[in-house]
Amino acid sequence: MIRSGLRFGLALMAVTALALFASQKIDSVLASGAPSVSLNAEHTGPRQVEDTTQKAVARDYAAAWQAMAEALEENRPDLLGPNFIGTAADKLTTGIEEQRKTGLHQRIVDKGHSVDVVFYSPDGSAMELHDTAQLELQVMDGGKVVHSEDATVHYVALLTAAENSWKVRAIEAVPEF
Amino acid sequence: MTKFVPLSPFVCSHFGPVEERAFRPASSGISEDSIWHLRSRTSDAKLGDYKRIDAGLKPRSSRASEMVAKAAFGCAAFLFVVCCLGLYGFSSELNLPSTVTAGTGMSIPTSGSGEAILYLVGPGTAIRRRVQLGQNLQLSADDLRNAGRYVISLGDNSATFFVTAAPVHTIAFLARPSRVPADTPNVISGTAFLFDRYQNLVLQPQPVKFELSVNGQILTRTEMSKDGVAYTKLDSSKKEGPAQFVASSGPASVRRVVQEVASDPCSLRMTAQRDKNGILVRTDPIRDCAGNPVPDGTIVTFTSTDSQGKSTVDARIKQGIAEAQLPASNDATISVASGVVIGNEIRWRNE
């Protein structure tokens, strides 16, 4: 009787431990995953966007957002990686350095992007996106929350094709499209 | 002795003028009990004082409800005053325009007194500054040079606003391809990205002029930009040469060179003659349909077919012509081609 009770208790503990471990794993996957990007290229001109290009753009744009959120939160420009070039990389790097100097950082909880490809250059080397992003934004002064909001923010992003990926060359928030 | 506690002007104003109530008739429902109650409280008061207060007395029940109402009203008034003071003295509102042009700076009036910390976070900007309330906050042109969304926070107030691009200052111009066949429709594409002096994309529609000129022949087209981008497609000119491809908008102008070369050969003709090692084949000067010489280095293929089989030799155009040596044959059919263009055919007989 006692032995069966112990066995049951041990089994329960093992199941609980497994469940906790699994939930932690799932959380970490979700936390480390790139944000969702829903891409629409139906009204793109002057060139049509091929299916493989659509997938590549969605993948690379999501990776860029993930990198940007991490870099702005940890004040580490190196986390921007190869996702940004040109003015976008310059401005983000400057901003992160300013944040580091002043002790500020930003926290972005990315709830997804609805993206329209509005321009694809005839030679296939550049693309412009209209991104409607659902974001939870926080500006932090050390550990103090200075500003917090749930916002729908519109972005115009300019991407250029590199050897094997798309890179963000310019990204600007706008009041509306 | 009755003590008169000084009240704030706001609270005092809720009591009616004393003189007005002093001569109210005694038959106004005031009971003896009520009078006694007052007397017991103001036993040391002078008669004049008594009269002035007595006239305002009412039955106990109505007096209690009136006191409750007055207390509630007083509390509400107190809260109102506190709130007013709070807004005036301890905090400050942010009165901002919704959009600001990049590089123009901004002055934000504040109210209140004392110091507060100003936070400004935007693209390429992170400012933490101690400021004096009651004075205008000055944000410099340099603080607001990057277009995008900014968060400003002062005390307990925060707000967002947008910085939009300044006028066009530079153009990023993609001209494709760099080398193009002459006399071909819609073969040259130009894409212009408009930026201001701070490298912000100019999203307001702007006219962009595209101009393609080669050998004095000029082709011009004006397109309106949309979301910072304008593009066009142009025909290549009939004559070969380096075409100057210029995109301009406002004061900004960018030049690219597109090399227009001869198109495919138009009529490919060759001759054949006996040679000590075989058959020497040679083309006439090779030109496209507009008369432009096909560039040197272009591949021309000679093919000889006889009873032994097929022999093929590739030769490059050199100084406008191509030549090659084919194996000797008594009876062969010789053909010439360049790209998709096929030239004349020679029936070779060794007599």
Image: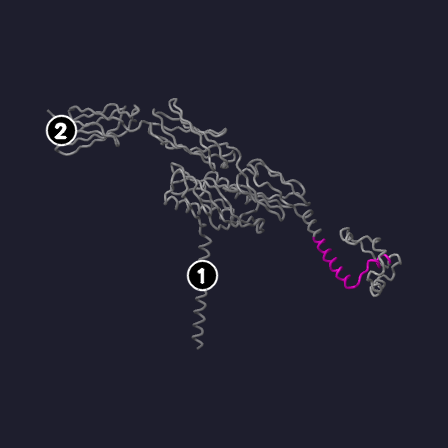
Chain holding disc 2: B
Kindly state the secondary structure of the residue where label 2 is placed. Answer: loop
Residue B76 placed where, x, y %?
Answer: 70, 55
Quadrant of the image for the N terminus of chain B? Answer: bottom right
Seen in the picture, residue B205 relative to B42 is either above or below; the reply is above
Query: Is residue B77 magenta-colored?
Result: yes
Magenta stretch in the rendered image: B51-79
**Residue, far right:** B47
> If the image is split into quadrants, where does the C terminus of chain B sit?
top left
In the image, A75 versus B3, the foreground residue is B3
Position in image of residue B214 (x %, y %): 38, 24
User: On what subunit does the disc labeled 1 rest?
Assistant: A
Near-viewer residue (A37 or A80): A37
CB atoms of marks 2 and 1 within 8 Å: no
Q: Main secondary structure of the magenta part?
A: helix
Determine which residue is flagged by label 1.
A21
Nearest to the eye among marks 2 and 1: give it. Answer: 2
Asked whether the residues under marks 2 and 1 belong to the same chain, the reply is no
What numbered label is drawn on residue B329? 2
Identity, as a three-letter code, of the amino acid under mark 1: Phe
x and y, in percent, of residue A174 in the image: 51, 41
